[in-house]
């Protein structure tokens, strides 16, 4: 059920907000505000160690770097149930992109992401933290 509410806002702030949401492609303020709220709810979820979260870890690395593919696989096997699936794309002669989809308690997922991203030889890593839709 939808509920309406009024928001008071400084005119200048509102103008900047309108410009931003137009650039981002929002058609209404309501949809933009709903997404901002959802973003905060997801963030809040990730601060609770045992909250069930979903995420994607992207890793760019040189597969010729000493034992790296093996090390990355080891990290992903250990916490077994956290990794839903992995997609591997060969970017060039040496570089690979791996996307690891993860689901589980926030703290464990974060720890796995940190471990993978900080592995020597990983050139760039990022965790996209999101949540399952039913809580949003
Ligand atoms: Ni590759």
Image (tube, rainbow, N blue to C red):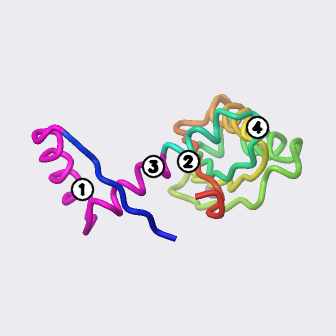
Query: Do the residues under discs 2 and 4 have CB atoms within 8 angstroms?
Result: no
Q: Residue at x 63, y 35 (%)?
A: 117
Q: Earlier in the sequence, mark 3 or mark 2?
A: 3
At numbered mark 3, what does the secondary structure look like: helix, strand or loop? Answer: helix
**In this rendering, position of residue 119 left or right of residue 92:** right
Q: Which numbered mark, 2 or 4, is in the foreground of this view?
A: 2
Residue 38: in magenta span:
yes
Q: Residue at x 55, y 47 (%)?
A: 128
The residue wearing badge 1 is 21
- Tell me which segment is drawn in magenta: 10-39
What is the C-alpha distance between the residues marked 1 and 2?
21 Å
Neighbor class of circle 1 (other Cα within 10 Å; few <14, some 14-19, many 20+) is: some
Q: Which of marks 1 and 2 is nearer the N terminus?
A: 1
Q: Which numbered mark, 3 or 2, is in the foreground of this view?
A: 3
What is the C-alpha distance between the residues marked 3 and 2?
17 Å
Q: Which numbered mark, 1 or 2, is in the foreground of this view?
A: 1
At numbered mark 4, what does the secondary structure look like: helix, strand or loop? Answer: loop
Q: Which of 92 and 18 is in front in this view?
A: 18
The residue wearing badge 2 is 128
Checking the image for residue 37, the label placed there is 3
Q: Which of marks 4 and 1 is nearer the N terminus?
A: 1
The residue wearing badge 4 is 67
Q: Name the spot of residue 101 as percent of width and height, x first.
A: 68, 56
What is the C-alpha distance between the residues marked 2 and 4?
26 Å
Q: Which residue is drawn at 16% across and 37% down?
A: 10
Q: Which of marks 3 and 1 is nearer the N terminus?
A: 1
Q: Which numbered mark, 3 or 1, is in the foreground of this view?
A: 3
Which quadrant of the structure image shows residue 135?
bottom right
């Amino acid at each position: 059920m939808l509920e309406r509410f009024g928001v008071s806002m400084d005119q200048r702030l509102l103008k900047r907000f309108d410009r931003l949401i137009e650039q981002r492609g929002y058609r209404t303020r309501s949809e933009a505000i709903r997404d901002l709220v959802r973003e905060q709810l997801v963030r809040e979820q990730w601060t609770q160690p045992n909250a069930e979260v979903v995420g994607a870890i992207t890793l760019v690395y040189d597969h010729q770097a000493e034992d790296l593919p093996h090390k990355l696989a080891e990290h992903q096997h250990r916490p077994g149930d956290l990794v839903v699936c992995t997609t591997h794309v060969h970017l060039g002669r040496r570089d690979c992109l791996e996307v690891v989809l993860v689901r589980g308690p926030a703290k464990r997922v974060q720890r796995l992401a940190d471990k993978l991203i900080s592995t020597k030889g990983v050139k760039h890593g990022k965790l996209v933290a999101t949540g399952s839709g039913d809580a949003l």
